[in-house]
Image (spheres, rainbow, N blue to C red):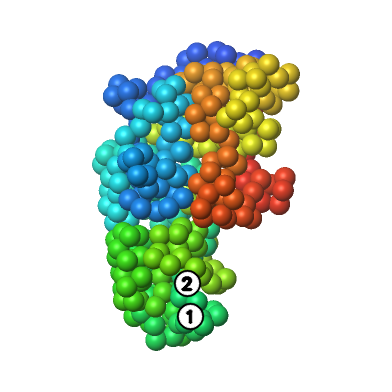
Amino acid sequence: MHLLRAFALCLTLGLVSEAVAQNVQPGPTLQAVRQRDALLCGASPNAPGFGAPDSRGDWQGIDPDVCRAVAAAVLGDASKVRFFPLTSQARFAALQSGQVDVLPRTVTWTHSRDTAVGLNFTTPVFYDGQGFLVRKSANIRQGTDLAGATICTFAGSTSELNLADWARANRVQYTPLVFEQNDEARIAYDNGRCDAISTDASQLIGLITAMRVPADHTVLRDRISKEPLTPAVRQGDDQWNDIVRWTIFALIEAEELGVTRANAEEMLQSQDPSIRRLLGQAGDHGPMMALDRRWAYNAIRAVGNYGEIFDRHVGRGSPIGLDRGINDLWTRGGLMYSPPIR
């Protein structure tokens, strides 16, 4: 008992971190990623702001940048990512089978997925809720005005189930028109095959930007669900779960500490203890996960901090133009919060 207490005290003081770090060996997923020298990332085929190839075929969005950050943390090179576009129905099997190493593909963290589907969820990268996209000319003010409507939604997603639950609870009769891809639903709606689209509100706002006349459409204020969008990994490899989760935490912590893509190198000279630990100038936090001490520095240099990623893809610096809202830092009234890196 006295030995255990002494060991616990040493851990608290950081006296045994170096010895622990030196003994950490790469787990199966980390070994596989290093052997192939590439991270395999599940991607959305067309979710503006979250994952879609641009005109040059380069993947853009919050989700691809999460993968680039992990690749930079693990391999020291954010370009060493292979993207695999996956439908909602195929994405979980792709992760379970090893086709991809990480799945940040606008995946909602739910109890059944966490316990029965063989997934582990890391930490949310976007807090969302399901809404309705409608035509302004329809004069629809709230979701219940859609009684009798045809509503487009997505197979194999929480959106399909949430819509059915909401309709049952509110005694709203509707006709579902179910698609696998965002683009399929958008085209069907734009061609008048359905009266509304229902999925995560942030994705609906992204879909508006691709409509023939974006100004003709709006997203209702109704939110019928909680959608914490969270990158997933396979169960059974705790080290890999830690690596992906703490890479995301590092991006959030960097924003809180004022570390950016542009000033990360300058910040290596900072005497702030929290910044020094984040950037690998103090402590053995990378080696504790079998990574380089500068794992977080490499991730931040590759994609910027969480605020930079948000602004670039879905925030005021993007065509989508979302406010931070609940996705702001906890210090500004939002939900984004990193446990201490110490």
> Which residue corresponds to the image point at 30% horizontal and 21% vertical from the top-left?
35
Looking at the figure, which quarter contains the N terminus? top right
Asked if residue 174 lies left or right of residue 293, the reply is left
Q: Which is more N-terminal, label 1 or label 2? A: 1
- Along the horizontal axis of the image, is 181 left or right of 237? left
Q: Is residue 312 above or below residue 293?
A: below
Q: Toward the viewer: 255 or 98? A: 255
Q: Is residue 284 left or right of residue 88?
A: right
Secondary element under disc 1, as helix, strand or loop, is helix
> Mark 2 and mark 1: span between their CA atoms?
7 Å
Amino acid marked by disc 2: Asp
Residue 331, relative to residue 260: is it above or below? below
- Do the numbered discs 2 and 1 sit on residues whose CB atoms are within 8 Å? yes
Percent x, y of residue 150:
36, 79
- Mark 2 burial class by Cα count in 10 Å: few <14, some 14-19, many 20+: few
Measured as percent of width and height from the top left, residue 135 is found at 46, 75
The answer to whether residue 195 is seen in the rendering is yes
| Residue type, mark 1 in image | Ser
Please provide percent x and percent y for residue 229.
48, 52
- Which residue is rendered at x = 40% and y = 57% of the image? 112
* SS type, badge 2: helix
Q: Is residue 224 visible?
A: no
Question: Is the C terminus in the top left, top right, bottom left or bottom right quadrant?
Answer: top right
Instruction: Report which residue position mark 1 lands on.
Output: 137
What residue is pinned by disc 2?
216
Residue 228, x across and y down, in percent: 51, 54
Q: Residues within 10 Å of mark 1 (few under 14, many from 20)?
A: few
214 or 144, which lies in front? 214
State the image quarter where residue 120 is shown: top left
Q: How many marks?
A: 2
Q: Identify which residue is drawn at 34% across, 40% down.
A: 56
